Amino acid sequence: MRPRIGYKKLAAVGVAAVVGVASTIALTSGSASAAPVFGYSGYAFGTDVKTGIANSGPQVVSQISCTTDSSRADKNDLATANVNDQAIARTVTTDTHAFNDARGNGVTSNATAADIKLGSLLSLTGAKTTTTAWYKNGNLYYTGSTTFASVKIGNLSVPNLLKAKPNTKVAIPGLGYIVLNRVGGVKTSSGIYSYAQAVVLHATVKNQYIPEGVDVAVLKTRAEITKPAIAMVIGDAYGTKANVDKLVTSGPTSYQATCQGTEGKTIRNAVAEVVIPKVAYVGAVYTTKYGVVGADKASVNFTSHVAGVKVGNLSIGAIESSASAWKTKDGKIGLASDSKVVSVTVGKKVYTVPNKPNQTLEIPGIAKLTFNQVLRQSRYISVNALVIDVYSLNTKVVVGHSAAGVVG
């Protein structure tokens, strides 16, 4: 098992700036007559909390991220998926896989759980959700559905909800309400994505299982396929992520990714604040993504913005990062990244923030800080504005992550 789980104007892509993209830009030439490619992307989560609370990241994750490989697949399993230290879903399995066969080119994502339970308030057994998106003969299609073996609300069995109609809302006394079989699909100029969620728990009153005001999606799937294009765009952005060794203790916040761009629109994802248990308090977080995919050009830009971070006596000011990638019809490829950390203080002591990539700063007895951590490959670039290694907790916190690339 393995839980794991965005601008200065660029002449090549015409993206309006939120964070200046100022670092190295490299252009490489490729074939001007490269064959069009398909992009496959999808995921399946056991649980996903939709607000910035402890343990807020996706759990039991299977994911393929914008690949042109039609044989790509991933799967995962975990005995229990927890939210707020409560066992919400048990015996969870997830898988997502691409295909290119008689059905066409597409992606299917599945998630199952032996049971989903909130004490005596709600019991759902034999839950399965699935979604598929595919392209065939110039057309785009999708399906999505959820089924249950049994549904029990309080002490009452409700057999007519075993195959609930899409987006069925049900009141749950002592919790708020749930939405069963949340499904849908969105067709764009460059492709289609579909989604399905077995159940979304909405806590609107105080209860012992989920903090009031929090929404939890259980068994969440997504499948995405692009039309043939000059290249696929990849990348992601998030505000924070924390782990001890290889164990994720707080998943990506305000996470965004893409495979088919955004039709030239900037999409924003935000949370008010994040608390990483026993490690850090993080202020407001938001990320943006922008991308286009077509026969003549493919481009993508991600940004990440964090209001500030506190780790004990260590206070860090606003943190930002951005990453961009593009490919044009003549085969030229460009990459760019940038990041900024406003300030670092411990008590009344102010530290100078390095302004070059991959620079470190030791805060004796507290943490090691790495600024503008850049990873660059021929068609992909990622940047972490700040990485905090907390000595006493053996914990690494990544703050302000953006990444972008092109495939094909």
Image (cartoon, grey):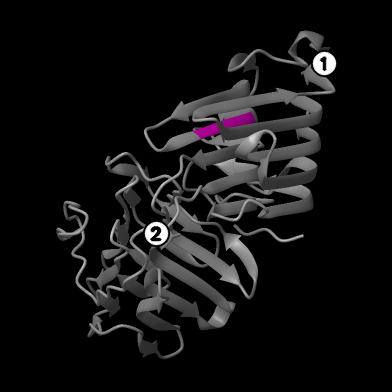
Q: Indicate whether residue 343 is drawn in magenta.
A: no
Q: Earlier in the sequence, mark 2 or mark 1?
A: 1
Name the element at disc 1. Answer: loop
Which region is colored magenta?
Answer: 193-197
**Direction top: furthest residue:** 160
Marks 2 and 1, how far apart at CA: 41 Å
For the N terminus, the quadrant is bottom right
Q: Which mark is residue 155?
A: 1
Q: Residue at x 81, y 11 (%)?
A: 159
Q: Which mark is residue 282?
A: 2
Instruction: From the viewer's side, name the closer residue of 267 and 135.
Output: 135
Mark 2 surroundings within 10 Å by alpha-carbon count, few (fewer than 14), some (14 through 19), many (20 or more): many
Name the quadrant containing residue 381: bottom left
Inspect this view and state whether residue 121 appears.
no
Q: Main secondary structure of the magenta part?
A: strand
Residue 255 position, x and y percent, is: 45, 51
